[in-house]
Image (cartoon, rainbow, N blue to C red):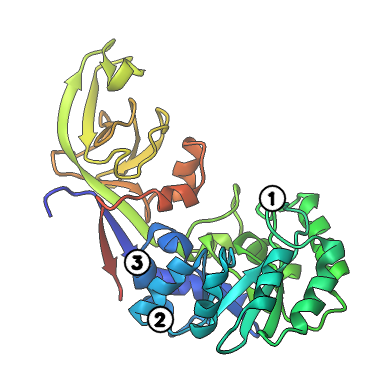
Amino acid sequence: MARAATATIDLAAFRENYRLAKSLAPTQQAVAIIKADAYGHGAVKMAFALEPDADAFGVACIEEALELREAGINKPILLLEGFFTKDELPIISENNFWCAVHSVEQIDSIAQAHLSKPMTVWLKMDSGMHRLGIMPNDYHEAYERLNNLEQVADIVLMSHFANADSLNCPITKKQINCFDEFSQTLKAPVSIANSAALLGHDNTRRNFQRPGIMLYGATPFSNPHPLADKLKPVMTLTSEIIAIREVPAGEGVGYSHRHICNQPTLVGTVAMGYADGYPRHAVDGTPIIVNGQRTAIIGRVSMDMLTVDLTQIEGVAVGSKVELWGNELAAAEVASYCDTIPYTLFTGITRRVHKKYINE
């Protein structure tokens, strides 16, 4: 491998973060969410690392679930978006996929399906996010319909929060109250806690938790939190300095000369750009670690490279290690400079970045 751009994935940290999620509701179950190629970390590899511990896995769609089954993952797999066409239903049944159901039309399709064995359904209520789900007033009827179908074995009641990462926001309490009001008479297990709810709202910890971003070591909160602070970074994105130059005061750096040097500046060029998944809209001042020392990006991120201020960095040379985020620099902090969230940083990593797995 010639180019140094590398995402080092710590599987021990991934397992430790899952165990933290489990410890918050130790008598209940936790579905490890590994959709979107495990948030850019590699779904098959992450699933195998966690399968001895995981109660189940969660993905977005049947293609992601089949990739895991074909690789040899045997634990139950939840399809969070459910099914899109009727021909998926026999495949769901045969492969022991758990399936979210969020519309009357999906219930109609299940009722008409010929399945080799009944399936497990996760019936989703729209408790206030207004994206997917059965409306509260129709939820009881939807449950009864499914409960009376021979195609359905078990039902789990579920919903999803719009604002659980804002700990003092009244929206979450309103959603919890709505869900409880319209589901309390139904005899079925419940799943409403994503990472933010699991960490920050203990009254959401029901029969099945759905930890996602926390498994990858990123906090869902904008401020420090005692539980989120225990998370271990899983992905460390690194590269190296490939060139160094002295730029006089008054000269510009990079495309459009967005950054103008206000003093003589030692500028380093890093082999990392937006074609690797590093956000192009990172502003001047976005933190970065060079040679174990904190500095900042200066100039616009380009396709294959970005530039950093090395003026105060000791011992720097061509080949010096650069950390974009990871063990020394939280992805959440980088994301805050880029008007985004850690989810987009992780899932944006492209295939050009070498993945290195440690602590298998």
Q: Position of residue 115 (x, y in %)?
A: 58, 84
Pick whichever, 204 or 74, lies toward us: 74
Give the CA distance from mark 1 to mark 3: 28 Å
Tell me, yes or no, whether the two marked residues, 2 and 1, touch with CB atoms within 8 Å.
no
- The reply to whether residue 45 is in sight is yes
Horizontal arrangement in the rendering, residue 129 relative to residue 73 (left or right): right
Tell me, yes or no, whether the two marked residues, 2 and 3, touch with CB atoms within 8 Å.
no
Horizontal arrangement in the rendering, residue 226 relative to residue 105 (left or right): left
SS for tag 2?
loop
Residue at point 75% right, 59% down? 126
Mark positioned earlier in the residue sequence (1 or 3): 3
Identify the residue at the far top of this view. Answer: 250
Q: Give the tally of numbered discs.
A: 3
Q: Position of residue 171 (x, y in %)?
A: 78, 51
- The reply to whether residue 22 is in sight is no
Give the CA distance from mark 2 to mark 1: 35 Å
**Disc 3 marks which residue?**
10
Mark positioned earlier in the residue sequence (2 or 3): 3
Of badges 2 and 3, nearer the viewer stands 2
Residue at point 16% right, 25% down? 245
Identify the image quadrant of the C terminus. Answer: bottom left
Assess disc 2: are there few (<14), some (14-19) or many (≥20) residues with their C-alpha within 10 Å of its C-alpha. Answer: some
Q: 238 above or below 214?
A: above
Q: 5 above or below 52?
A: above
Give the CA distance from mark 2 to mark 3: 20 Å
Mark positioned earlier in the residue sequence (2 or 1): 2
**Disc 1 marks which residue?**
166
